[in-house]
Image (cartoon, helix red, strand yellow):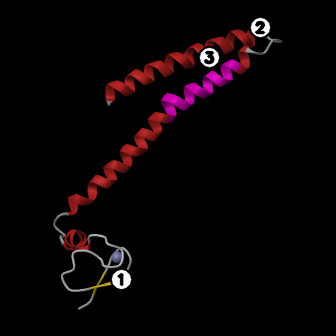
Amino acid sequence: MSIFCPFCGEELVDNAKFCKNCGKNVESYGNMANDTSNTNSFNPPVVEKSHTLATVLGFIFSILIPLIGIIIGIYLYTRKDSPKAKRYGLLVIVLGVVVWIISFFLGLLIQ
Ligand SMILES: [Zn+2]
């Protein structure tokens, strides 16, 4: 029975530990695929993926939203025609900076 490299498809010699074409470890891959009882080994990548998603969402909420707020605030603040817009812009800038600082320290605490 021929065994083929799961990475590049090269035909492997019997009991080969490494693929002679791409050099990847095919022995550990074969053990992992054959061991049906060890389905838990497939969970970590999912956890890692959701963790990455949480990190991305955290990044968006903690950095991008305050940053957008600050940019909008600066835009409103620099408008000379409307004192109301200027006050509102200053408020948005202050809120954005406060949220940014709080998110930053919360991020440090979580890590
Ligand atoms: Zn290969």
**Start and end of the magenta stretch?**
60-74
Secondary element under disc 2, as helix, strand or loop, is helix
* Mark sitting earlier along the chain (2/3): 2
Spatial CA span between label 1 and label 2 = 72 Å
Tell me the quarter of the picture where residue 72 sits.
top right
Q: Does 67 sit above or below residue 5?
A: above
Q: What label sits on residue 10 in the rendered view?
A: 1
Q: Is mark 1 within 8 Å of ligand 1?
A: yes
Residue on which the image places disc 3: 92
Q: Residue at x 75, y 15 (%)?
A: 78
Describe the element under mark 1 as helix, strand or loop.
loop
Residues packed near mark 3 inside 10 Å, few (<14), some (14 to 19) or many (20 plus): many
Q: Position of residue 70 (x, y in %)?
A: 62, 21
* Image point (54%, 17%), residue name: 97
Q: Quadrant of ligand 1?
A: bottom left
Q: Which residue is mark 2?
A: 83
Q: Of callouts 1 and 2, which one flags the residue occurring earlier in the amino acid sequence?
A: 1
Q: Nearer the viewer, residue 102 or 6?
A: 6
Residue 66 inside the magenta-drawn segment: yes
Q: CA distance from mark 1 to mark 3?
A: 60 Å
**Dot 3 amino acid type:** Val
